[in-house]
Amino acid sequence: MQIAEDYSHCEFLIRLPGYCPMPAFRDAFDVPLVVRRFHKSREEVRRELGISEDVKIVILNFGGQPAGWSLKKEYLPDGWLCLVCGASDTMDLPSNFIKLPKDVYTPDLIAASDCMLGKIGYGTCSEALAYKIPFVFVRRDYFNEEPFLRNMLEFYQAGVEMIRRDLLTGHWRPYLERAISLNPCYEGGINGGEVAARILQDTASGKNYTSDKLSGARRLRDAIVLGYQLQRVPGRDLSIPDWYANAENELVLRTGSPTAEMSDDSFHMPSSPEDFEILHGDFMGLSDTINFLKSLSELDAILDSGKSTEKHQRRERKAAAGLFNWKEDIFVARAPGRLDVMGGIADYSGSLVLQMPIREACHVAVQKIHPSKQRLWKHAQARQNAKGQGPTPVLQIVSYGSELSNRGPTFDMDLSDFMDGEQPMSYEKAKSFFACDPSQRWAAYIAGTILVLMKELGVRFENSISLLVSSAVPEGKGVSSSAAVEVATMSAIAAAHGLNINPRDLALLCQKVENHVVGAPCGVMDQMTSACGEANKLLAMVCQPAEVLGLVDIPNHIRFWGIDSGIRHSVGGADYGSVRIGAFMGRKIIKSVASELLSKSFANGVTSDDLEEDGVELLETEASLDYLCNLSPHRYEALYVKQLPETVLGEKFLDKYKDHNDPVTVIDKKRNYGLRAATRHPIYENFRGKAFKALLTSATSDEQLSALGELMYQCHYSYSACGIGSDGTDRLVQLVQEMQHNKKSRSSEGTLYGAKITGGGSGGTVCVVGRNCLKSSEQILQIQQRYKDATGYLPIIFEGSSPGAGKFGHLRIRRRLQRKQN
């Protein structure tokens, strides 16, 4: 509240490149990078240090080193030197590390280096870009600006992310070698300090920089409301909270959706789902679906009123207002996110997984329309005119929530661009196509569904497609925001084109979007839950590749919650991919060991009719192991665990085994992979999942809940052993344990019983199991507040459930010709 009040007194925001969205400010002025200029040339600095031009230099710029951290000579590639900033006087360094004085002018040394290694921050990012120095960076927990700075580095080809474990264990070589292969390409200004000073000087002398004078009370309202949305429901298309709307009379202000405001002299156009005729489908009593249809009505109202101006409408709303032809049918689909109760990353190894669809969902509206009737945006129309071919099929997409994700709100392309001659383009070309512009990369999740339908089902799209995406599933929280978008999009497109795809097949097609078009090596459980799940039930599925065992009712006395750690999760991140590679390496080695044991058995005269201690039939099965989870824990411990190294260098593995047989990941020859933990996890997780499922149907007791919680704890610490835990998720699990074991809980009926990290790990959301009672909900809120007190971040709490896309089906709607006026 204090920050919101402070913002209310501001006239405008001076915004730097790589900014974090701050929607409370209505006026923002973009300025170039703020950079310290170097005083000496690269040659002068190297000459003073006695380092020749042919020596590679990395500058270690962390602003202080972890206590007890010892740098070693082998951390660097042969012939490299490392300049160390902030080293203590007592710190001993190897011969290839150079301790810099405390008062050294860092920009000169950065400019003289070949790359920089440090934690991500605005200053280091700015200077890396300004001096065109590749930046090897490590994530910072609870640092809100991180994803936006990472995007900026990626866009200008200047960043390489290093996982924290490799930093501390000295596995630097592949990151440094990758960094010097980059060609940073930032050509923008670096005089942001001067530009900002001029704006401030002009403002002080009386020049008005504000484009829309708003009262302090009005700006305070906007700061509170938009801050509420940013914190609680990122990306969600909502009206302002009821508690604020009820204050209208006190403040003498008109309250309404901050995304659809009207100026004081404009009239209010009422809207409701009744403005649409429902030709097919059912709301199913879902309030978020009703709200989505209301938002569609408001778009029509914006056009009808003629009052929409760029000053009062966000860019995405303006684009969406002209997206649909209201005389034609629109198809609406809905797909929820999911809470990973058990299974997680073991899905790609064939594990049993138990997943719950959450209340938050993505809605997609699609209109298939003849190219001559499609409303084209001006630049799309200009592109078509330039070709001189008349109307051709065009895909136009608007995605709400762009301000919260630092991405473009719109995307469009000619559907013919998906063709390579007479056939659809390859997935590899499509991945490169969408990756070329970081601000448009999000479109791969949506437009990629069209390419997959073309390639896998032979569908040809001869009409234009207009598509609106509105998702309440927050991104980067580990609750499958991407799967919800993919499933909702493909469901709506399929409905609009008369394609009858069952939910299971649709989920498998959506997995192809994420694996092959986006390039994220995810399993299939996310898409399956979003497509096949049902409210208040766990989807039980064996991921081989997607065998649904059924739906498991959640007993009335048990409840699951999700608590977001605030640490952004990415299934495409290096940690997740390296653990997946380690698991597939382990499977390859186990198959090889089983084949060797089998060969020795037959060489000793043992036939398939005989049984020896190890079991010939079992060895035959294990020698052709399709999924790692088909190996039982006792067989793993008895025969294979000692044959698996803790870690293995990619090059060494490839020399011996040629390939790891995973179609969606590539082994880095220079990287060490944690193999044993990555192999062990899915084998034991499959067993834990089976036990968890059996316990849910057992007799109600404290022992039942305690056992469920214990299985969750075991899963959580197994993630950590694989290297895909995080400080935030560990803290949340610890808070659950403290709540579970305090004297008050032990002396009365327990409420919370266990917790675990979810999904791909490395941040995201923690799943909590507890007794379904008021006291449990109170304890969840206490954990939320204690986490905020410790980190400054107030977690989002996920509770409740909703139906999957298959259960929802689709709506076919049409705008009523005559609208009611009040």
Image (cartoon, grey):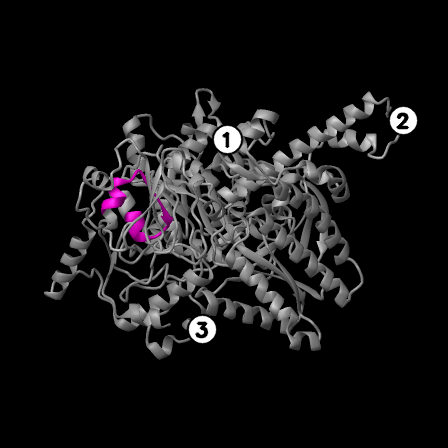
Q: In whole angstroms, how far apart are the C-alphas of marks 3 and 2? A: 75 Å
Front-most of residues 578 and 473: 578
Q: Is residue 13 left or right of residue 591?
A: left
Q: In whole angstroms, how far apart are the C-alphas of marks 1 and 3? A: 57 Å
Q: Which residue is mark 1?
A: 669
Q: In whole angstroms, how far apart are the C-alphas of marks 1 and 2? A: 43 Å
Residue 730 against residue 643 in the figure, above or below: below
Nearest to N terminus: mark 1 or mark 2: 2
Nearest to N terminus: mark 1 or mark 3: 3
Callout 1 touching callout 2 (CB < 8 Å) = no
Q: Which residue is mark 2?
A: 609
Badge 3 crowding class, 10 Å Cα cut-off, few under 14, some 14 to 19, many 20 or more, is few
Q: Is residue 797 left or right of residue 137?
A: right
| Residue 321 in view | no
Q: Is residue 765 left or right of residue 560?
A: left
Report the magenta residues as a range.
108-126
Q: Which residue is mark 3?
A: 243
Q: Position of residue 456 (x, y in %)?
A: 56, 29
Quarter of the view holding residue 145? bottom left
Quarter of the view holding residue 609? top right
Q: What is the three-letter code of the residue carrying label 3?
A: Trp
Across the whole image, how many numbered discs are drawn on residues? 3
Q: Position of residue 526 (x, y in %)?
A: 59, 46
Q: Residue furthest right?
A: 609
Q: Residue furthest bottom?
A: 250
Q: Looking at the image, which residue is at 69% across and 39% down? A: 642
Residue 180 against residue 633 in the figure, above or below: above
- Magenta span contains residue 120: yes
Q: Position of residue 405 (x, y in %)?
A: 40, 51
